[in-house]
Image (tube, helix red, strand yellow):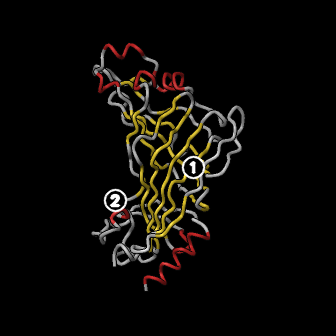
Amino acid sequence: MKSGRHARLVALVVGAFAAMAMFSPAAQAVELNPGYTQFAGCPDPFNGSPNIVTCVRSDITGGNFKMGNKNVPIANPIALTGGVENELKNFSYNSEGGLQKVKQPVPGGLIGLTGLDWLINFLNVEQLKLYAVTELAGTPTFTDLNNATLPIKAHLVNPVLGNNCYVGSNEKPISLNLTTGTTEPPAPNEPITGQAPTPSVDPVLEIFHADNGIFVDNSFAAPGASGCVLTLFGFLPVSLDAAVNLASGLPSAAGKNETKQNFDLELVNAEFPYE
């Protein structure tokens, strides 16, 4: 029976990695079979999610993200996990899945973000550090292994910035049109080229792999920051949006931003981790 399910999986993958939708959490996953624990975010097709036929895991393993004049290396891997229905549609995930909220250190820290040099006199080294966390701001779609659309927002994390300092939002996301091919950006950016992943199949676990791919996009626009406030010395919060935008070159028009994302992809029949 496994070989038949595997054949259907490979046929789906070769044809296209279709649109993802419905990023709503499903029930908590049960313990997975050995060798499949990386799919912990995939809903259980035997327990409340009968329409899930394929488990999906995508790992961004490196690269960079440049908006305005700020360039943030992707130093810590980010995983997107869940499951899809027939034809790889209707992505959903349990409480262990979705897009991991992973902190990426931002070069220049809080002072580089705001341009407020005097903060160094009042904050310690840890308080001056700044992190960016990528969060979903809409429905990602993957048309095939080489092209994807990813709407995101960047959460800027620092103890004196408040809890809601973002670049992008659900209403105005940063829309990445990722490709492993060659981009066609507006000026002043010039075309850049990604790298198609290398496909393979684990003969024992029957997991489909597409590894060592590179997604690129340098055609997207970046909105201004919002919700950034200075909370210091117990005084009422003071908006820092204008300072952040001025120091960081935001908003930034299409043709002035860039991302490169190294990625690996894994797909498996949804029954295998749970049967």
Check disc 1 and report its element: helix, strand or loop: strand
Q: Tag 2's secondary structure?
A: loop
The image shows residue 71 at horizontal and vertical percentages of 51, 32
In which quadrant of the rendered image does the N terminus lie?
bottom left
From this view, report whether residue 104 is shown above or below residue 212: above
In the visual, does 115 lie left or right of 47? right
- Which image quarter: residue 184? top right
Q: Is residue 107 left or right of 151 when viewed as pictured? A: left
Report the residue marked by disc 1. 215
> Between tags 1 and 2, which lies in front?
1
Q: Residue at x 65, y 51 (%)?
A: 181
- Total count of labels: 2
Q: What crowding class fits label 1: few (fewer than 14 Cα within 10 Å), some (14-19), or many (20 or more)?
A: many
- Mark 2 packing: few (<14 Cα in 10 Å), some, or many (20+)? some
What residue appears at the point 39 percent right and 43 percent down from the top-left corner? 76
Q: Which mark is residue 96?
A: 2
Image height of 102 relative to 84, above or below? above
Question: Residue 132: image x %, image y %?
Answer: 42, 37
What amino acid is labelled 2 in the image?
Glu
Residue at 34% from the left image edge and 75% from the top image edge? 274
Whether the residues at callouts 1 and 2 have beta carbons within 8 Å, the answer is no
Q: Amino acid at mark 1?
A: Phe
Q: Nearer the viewer, residue 100 or 1?
A: 1
Q: Residue at x 62, y 51 (%)?
A: 179
Q: Along the line of sight, which residue is nearer the eye, 198 or 185? A: 198
Residue 89 vs residue 1, the one in the foreground = 1
Whichever of labels 1 and 2 marks the residue nearer the N terminus, that label is: 2
Q: Residue furthest bottom?
A: 1
Q: Position of residue 12 (x, y in %)?
A: 56, 73
Q: Position of residue 171 (x, y in %)?
A: 54, 45
Q: Quadrant of the C terminus?
A: bottom left
Q: CA distance from mark 1 to mark 2?
A: 25 Å
